Amino acid sequence: MNKVFFSFDIEDYFMANCFDQQLKRSQWLGFESKIEYSFQILLDLLEKKNIKATLFFLGFIGKSHPKLVKIAHAKGHEIASHGYHHELVYNLSPNQFDEDIKKSTNILEDLIGEKILGYRSPSFSLDINDFRYTDILEKYGIKYDSSAFPNRFKSKSKINTKKPFFISDNLMEIPLSSEKLFGINFPLGGAYFRLYTKGLNRLLFRRYIEKNNLIFYLHPWELLNSHPFYPKNQYLRFKHTYNIGDNCKKKFLSIREFNTGLMREFLS
């Protein structure tokens, strides 16, 4: 029977790439953080739905809020890497990417005492066809990547398959999910999940799970009713904040019960 694999990219509201033109990473510590509050909302929702999820932590969050990683791990959630500083991979040289992966995996592994097996690039910015970068994931013991998002406009990897496949002998790609309806591809998760109605989300989930395992993603900051700071660009502000908070929580709670799993299960 197919499963839904719930995954969450663990970052603060101002760490999203829509803020890249407004602030520098060196300013992050000066902003009002909401990660502890939003992360607790996430943990409560997962407990209410009896879901164990795969959590892609930024190394920066692991360093600045180590207890969040430890709490999640103790609750049985899978800890994976989202890189260190949420830098778009296509803006990094291979050497810079190497340093990013080394730094982020070392922090997370030290916190949980286990190997980090999974990685997801910020904003799906890793081109999985560029072996200069995927070889670096293998170098640091990453066994699966989840950066390909078929039919998402900005996904760097243009693939059509919905099923996991091996990029190399030791690295699996686990694409995110999108479902075709009325000739239109509907990505599942994130801002798309907030944009769709509860009924449409339920329909897309049901149709997809009949044929494939479903990979779903969301961010803790999408569970906040408001943010202290917003993108200046109106389109980015709309995309970043539409139906966040209670609306997003209600949609998540309305998802019907499915068999669920951790993404590392694909490796076995």
Image (cartoon, rainbow, N blue to C red):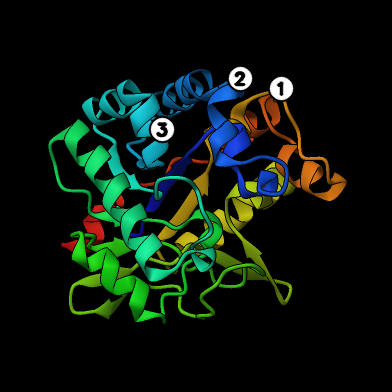
Q: Residue shown at 45%/73% (left/top)?
A: 162
Figure check: 16 above or below 71: below
Sequence-wise first label, 2 or 3: 2
State the quadrant of the C terminus. bottom left
Residue named by callout 3: 61
Across and down, in percent, residue 55 comes to 37, 41
Across and down, in percent, residue 262 comes to 29, 48
Q: Are marks 2 and 1 in contact (CB under 8 Å)?
A: yes
Q: Residue shown at 79%/41% (left/top)?
A: 237
User: 44 and 140: which one is in front?
Assistant: 140
Residue 74 placement: quadrant: top left
Distance, label 2 to label 1, CA atoms, is 7 Å
Q: Is residue 141 visible?
A: yes
Question: Residue 174 — which label?
Answer: none
Residue named by callout 1: 228
Q: Residue shown at 35%/59% (left/top)?
A: 2
Q: Secondary structure at mark 3?
A: helix
Q: Is residue 197 visible?
A: no
Residue named by callout 2: 32
